[in-house]
Image (cartoon, grey):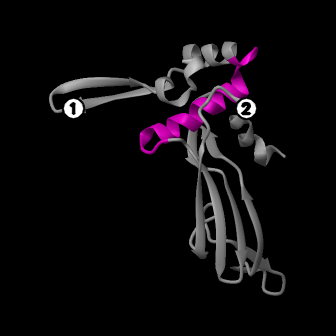
Amino acid sequence: MKKFEYLKVFNSPFKRPKLKWYIGKIAIGTPYFYPRVVDKKTNRFKPKKIGFDFVGLGYKTKWSPTDYRFEWSPLISFVFFKWQVAVSLLAPFDGIKSSLYWEAWLYYHYNTKGTQRERAEQCKKDFPSGYSGFNGSEKYSVNTYDYILKDKYR
């Protein structure tokens, strides 16, 4: 069930992820390869004909146990011969904030305690999330929590 822990994001201070549906010829990896199975006779991989794949939230830690790095979004895939139906849970926005969304949620999920409000405050304090850049010659900074948390938790 650890593969489905990401579903707890729906009952958290974080904005709900968006669902991205795909229906068509097999084109979505699970996560690195198209859906496949091992041929028992040749001990080699072959394309999956029929079946489900459940892909959990992909992440790793880098320099410390709380230095989360987002790798891929959770995904459920169903293959029927050469056709695929897949649904991915994506951050509620695109761009760099999408990885920051999942990294902040991982810190919230694994490294905070208390009520949801206390955990959100601890997350903002202990796991700052943001980025900066230039708009022409003007520097700007963005606090990611202003975008990823529901209004009452900001």
Residue in the picture at 73% in, 32% down: 11
Above or below, 53 relative to 50: above
Q: State the image coordinates of residue 60 (x, y, percent, origin top left).
A: 62, 41
Amino acid under label 2?
Asn
Looking at the rendered image, the quarter that the C terminus falls into is top right
Residue 88 covered by magenta stretch: no
From which residue to which does the magenta span run? Answer: 93-116
Judging from the image, what secondary structure is the residue with disc 1 in? strand
For residue 135, the mark is 1
Tag 2 residue: 11
Residue in the picture at 58% in, 75% down: 24
Q: Quadrant of residue 85?
A: bottom right
Residue in the picture at 62% in, 38% down: 16
Amino acid under label 1?
Asn
Q: State the image coordinates of residue 149 (x, y, percent, origin top left).
A: 56, 26
Above or below, 59 relative to 117: below
Q: What distance separates the C-alpha of mark 2 from that of mark 1?
A: 36 Å
Q: State the image coordinates of residue 4 (x, y, percent, origin top left).
A: 77, 46
User: Which numbered disc flags the more N-terminal residue, 2 or 1?
Assistant: 2
* Residue 142 shows up from this direction: yes
Q: Residues within 10 Å of mark 2 (few under 14, many from 20)?
A: few
Residue 109 covered by magenta stretch: yes
